[in-house]
Image: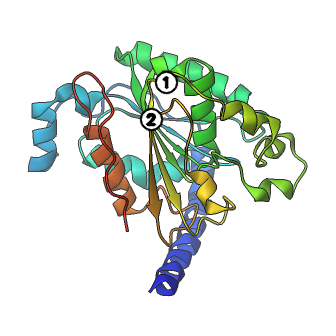
């Protein structure tokens, strides 16, 4: 069963990698920023989605920023973005940071600037961030080392090498050196983060070919409220496109109380 699941996952990974390659050139353009999509009109939504807007307009309107991984751009989120919008989240933003980024810290500063711009534009003091691969490391550095927990309510990471990846030893690039397990940067980012107000939800897959070992995409950091969700048979690039993952993300972004207190962990997807 596990072998069959892995084979299906590998096939999905190949198909999506090919599709993403064709979309990549379109993602090099700067994402268009604007207000809430469709405002608060609800006729285009299903009854369940309408209920979400009617019962908690603030929850549905909380901005969500999508942050891509290494050598990528916002096109990786084409399906995830659509899925969130269809579920009633009406402020979904994307950003690109340079494919030539050599330092996680530099990208984190750029992220901080983007989040400040979104906060000013929308009037929301705190937002959610959904990040893939390296993007999750960038976002976690921002919330734990640059005071970003004041701005980020929930950080969702998809296949992010929180403890590094052995594949980073393959090339001597400065950014990859930061992602090596036990590197000075990894020691820095994994220092305790007392009273961090950002809730982190880390999705990781047992067949993630980019994070080695795969469990390094889970997060266990003192002072950070984290929920780790293990997925089975899903490739690295496929994490942002699977309906089950999109559903889990949407569900967790609605499981918040009025004070923003983190909710209890939910059973991992089998």
Q: Secondary structure at mark 1?
A: loop
Quadrant where the image shows the N terminus: bottom left
Q: Is residue 43 visible?
A: no
Determine whether 103 is above or below 45 in the image: above
Please indicate whether residue 169 sits to the left or right of residue 41 in the image.
right
Tell whether label 2 touches label 1 (CB within 8 Å). Answer: yes
Identify the residue at image location x=43%, y=12%. 120
Q: Of callouts 1 and 2, which one flags the residue occurring earlier in the amino acid sequence?
A: 1
Q: Quadrant of residue 39?
A: top left
Quadrant where the image shows the C terminus: bottom left
Q: Is residue 106 visible?
A: yes
Determine whether 163 is above or below 53 in the image: below
x, y percent for residue 189: 67, 32
Q: Which residue is mark 2?
A: 225
x, y percent for residue 119: 42, 17
Determine whether 10 is above or below 65 in the image: below
Closest to the observer, 89 or 162: 162
x, y percent for residue 234: 51, 68
x, y percent for residue 29: 59, 39
Closest to the observer, 5 or 27: 5
Please indicate whether residue 176 sits to the left or right of residue 260 in the image.
right
Q: Which residue is mark 1?
A: 196
Determine whether 236 is above or below 154 in the image: below
Q: Residues within 10 Å of mark 2 (few under 14, many from 20)?
A: many
Q: Quadrant of residue 50?
A: top left
Q: Given the current orientation, which residue lies at the most extreme right position?
A: 172
């Amino acid at each position: 069963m596990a072998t069959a699941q892995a084979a299906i996952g590998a096939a999905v990974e190949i198909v999506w990698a090919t599709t993403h390659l064709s979309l990549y050139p379109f993602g090099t353009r700067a994402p268009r920023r604007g207000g809430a999509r469709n405002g608060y009109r609800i006729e285009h939504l299903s009854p369940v989605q309408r209920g979400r807007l009617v019962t908690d307009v603030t929850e549905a309107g909380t901005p969500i920023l999508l942050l891509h991984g290494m050598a990528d751009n916002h096109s990786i989120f084409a399906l995830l973005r659509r899925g969130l919008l269809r579920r009633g989240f009406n402020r979904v933003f994307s950003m690109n940071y340079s494919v030539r980024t050599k330092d996680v810290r530099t990208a984190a500063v750029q992220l901080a600037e983007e989040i400040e711009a979104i906060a000013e534009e929308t009037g929301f003091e705190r937002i959610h961030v959904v990040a893939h691969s390296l993007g999750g490391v960038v976002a976690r550095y921002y919330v734990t080392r640059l005071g970003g927990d004041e701005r980020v309510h929930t950080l969702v990471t998809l296949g992010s090498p929180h403890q590094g990846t052995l594949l980073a030893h393959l090339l001597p690039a400065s950014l990859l050196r930061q992602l090596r397990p036990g590197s000075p940067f990894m020691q820095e980012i994994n220092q305790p983060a007392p009273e961090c107000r950002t809730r982190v939800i880390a999705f990781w897959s047992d067949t993630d070919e980019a994070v080695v070992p795969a469990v390094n995409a889970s997060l266990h950091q003192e002072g950070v409220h984290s929920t780790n969700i293990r997925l089975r048979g899903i490739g690295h690039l496929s994490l942002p496109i699977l309906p089950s993952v999109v559903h889990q993300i949407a569900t967790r972004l609605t499981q918040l109380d009025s004070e923003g207190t983190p909710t209890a962990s939910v059973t991992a997807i089998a």
